[in-house]
Image (spheres, rainbow, N blue to C red):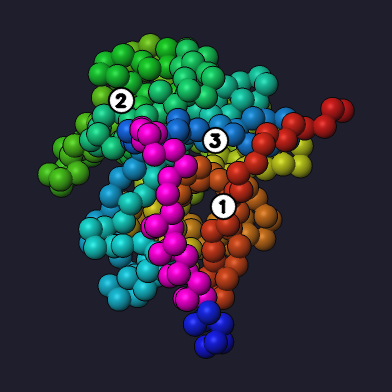
Amino acid sequence: MNKNLHRIFLAVAFTGAGLLATLPTANAQATVPAQQKTQVPGYYRMQLGDFEVTALYDGYVQIDNKVIKGINAEDAKSLLNKMFLDSTNGVQTAVNAYLVNTGSNLILVDSGAAKCFGPTMGNIKSNITASGYQPEQVDTILLTHLHPDHACGVSNQDKMVFPNATVYVAKADADYWLSSEIAAKAPADAKPMFKLAQDAIAPYKTANKFKTYHAGDALVPGVKIIPTPGHTPGHTSYLFSSGEHNLLIWGDIVHSHSIQFAQPEVAMEFDTDSKQAIETRKILFANVAENKLWIGGAHLPFPGLGHVGTEGKGYKWIPIEYSPIIQPQSK
């Protein structure tokens, strides 16, 4: 913008602001209603071939700057500022889950935190209902891993929230988080994570509705297991395919979209194996960018759906644009 145009813009802007302040209201007797202070229900839908995908918002969690590893404070601040994010008190990250109606199964990928992590989360059940479904209609739950913000939502105290569903998780994750021996040897600040996971799964184990799997196993039609370890020992992503349409729901590959797309080598303190998590992220970014896959991310800005593109030496997040549901063409 040249200097003259800049001056004209400022003059018009400030003159306009002054005029608005002096204009009379259309109806001086009208009463301004109270602000509503509520948000719309947290769900968003897209069509994936013949599959219907409903993104569900559980809430948000604040990530402390101290848990971000592999980048200095100034570089991190620069990347966050680029996204107009104030990192003074940490970084807010969404917690998302995904409900996929394949026509044969109603599948929930991850279940949110319920009340395990405080009042800013715990909205998966209510948002399922708001989206037009009922928890009783879910027949399959695929957990990317057993961290509480993904697994706690399957239960309410000692009762199943999804009474007709079978819960699946990778055996490597179950062997780690559900092990009383490993939990006993864990650092004091990590012990609650084990207990929360074990308590969430307990009612499904009692009802014989909890199952583990290995890479290569077939779970439900239209879904492929993609091992993505590092964040946890058995962290797993799920590839949903309908015809030529593919969506990879990748769990916790990214916690800070502002930082980790630009610098995939940045890890999180709560990764079980940071080196492996970084290697997994780099391989996955390259693959999904090249193959133009749809992505569903548990900690990407809601609805967490979009694509990964390349930018410079790193990558960028390209979120989905709001649109009507485009139905698949009849065959």
Judged from the image, the secondary structure of the residue bearing numbered disc 3 is: strand
Which range of residues does the magenta coloring cover?
9-33
Instruction: Please state if 149 lies on the left or on the right of 330 as rendered.
Output: left
Q: Amino acid at mark 1?
A: Pro
Residue 319 — which label? 1
Identify residue for label 3. 44
Q: Secondary structure at mark 2?
A: helix
How many numbered marks, from 0 up? 3
Does label 2 or label 1 sit earlier along the sequence? 2
Toward the viewer: 225 or 109?
Answer: 109
- Measured in 3D between alpha carbons, the distance from the residue under mark 3 to the one under mark 2, in whole angstroms, is 26 Å
Label 1: element kind? strand
Q: Residues within 10 Å of mark 3 (few under 14, many from 20)?
A: many
Quarter residue 196 falls in: top left
The magenta stretch spans residue 14: yes
Residue positioned 54% across, 58% down in the render: 317
Q: Which residue occupies the foreground of this view, 136 or 231?
A: 136
Whichever of labels 3 and 1 marks the residue nearer the N terminus, that label is 3
| In the image, residue 2 above or below residue 93 | below
Looking at the image, residue 97 lies above or below residue 133: below
